[in-house]
Image: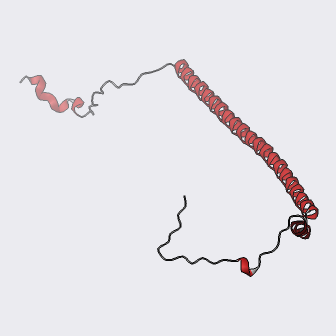
């Protein structure tokens, strides 16, 4: 060792803090213009997405509204048709009742009985005309 190295006690550099060597950081310095352009692009893109979302929501709400209104129109038309048919049915039932009453008045039971006795010579059955038939257990009626 040389004498120069022996005077280390007077070397003040030994007491200085040694700063560690910094490794090169991966920091990219962008100019402010590029940063503003990037933010403007992101802002513009967000606005465009918002406009698209509002447009889609509006279209869907219009479609739903149209469907509801269309269904209500069909329901109203069908209700009207049902009421018309029910009214027609009521009128037809009324005509039926009127025709039945008219038929009853034209052909009362007493008049029919009188025509059967006098014109056709029919008489009511008397007990002597009734015959009873006994069937044995072995007889079976079959439908042919």
Q: Position of residue 132 (x, y in %)?
A: 63, 78
Tell me what residue is drawn at x 52 percent, y 64 percent: 142
Q: How is the image coloured?
A: secondary structure
Q: In this view of the protein, which residue sits in the foreground, 43 or 102?
A: 102
Q: Quadrant of residue 120?
A: bottom right
Q: Quadrant of residue 29?
A: top left
Vertical arrangement, residue 139 with respect to residue 47, above or below:
below
Vertical arrangement, residue 8 with respect to residue 113, above or below:
above
- Give the quarter of the figure containing the N terminus: top left
Q: Position of residue 87 (x, y in %)?
A: 86, 52
Tell me what residue is drawn at x 88 percent, y 66 percent: 112
- Give the quarter of the figure containing the C terminus: bottom right
Q: In this view of the protein, which residue sits in the foreground, 77 or 66?
A: 77
Viewed as shown, does residue 8 lie left or right of 78?
left
Query: Which residue in the rendered view is the most extreme toward the left?
Result: 1
Q: How many marks?
A: 0
Tell me what residue is drawn at x 55 percent, y 61 percent: 143
Q: In this view of the protein, which residue sits in the foreground, 32 or 125?
A: 125
Tell me what residue is drawn at x 81 percent, y 45 percent: 81
Q: Position of residue 19 (x, y in %)?
A: 29, 31
Q: Quadrant of residue 115?
A: bottom right
Q: In this view of the protein, which residue sits in the foreground, 7 or 46?
A: 46
Q: Position of residue 118 (x, y in %)?
A: 90, 68
Query: Which residue in the rendered view is the most extreme toward the bottom?
Result: 127
Vertical arrangement, residue 35 with respect to residue 94, above or below:
above
């Amino acid at each position: 060792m040389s004498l120069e190295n022996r005077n280390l006690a007077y070397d003040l550099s030994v007491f200085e803090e040694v700063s560690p060597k910094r490794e090169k950081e991966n920091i990219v310095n962008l100019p402010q213009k590029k940063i503003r352009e990037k933010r403007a692009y992101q802002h513009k893109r967000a606005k465009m997405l918002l406009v698209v979302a509002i447009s889609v929501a509006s279209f869907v709400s219009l479609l739903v509204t149209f469907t509801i209104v269309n269904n209500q129109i069909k329901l109203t038309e069908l209700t009207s048709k049902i009421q018309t048919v029910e009214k027609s049915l009521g009128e037809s039932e009324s005509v039926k009742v009127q025709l039945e009453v008219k038929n009853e008045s034209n052909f009362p039971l007493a008049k029919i009985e009188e025509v059967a006795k006098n014109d056709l010579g029919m008489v009511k059955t008397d007990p002597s005309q009734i015959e009873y038939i006994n069937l044995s257990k072995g007889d079976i009626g079959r439908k042919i």
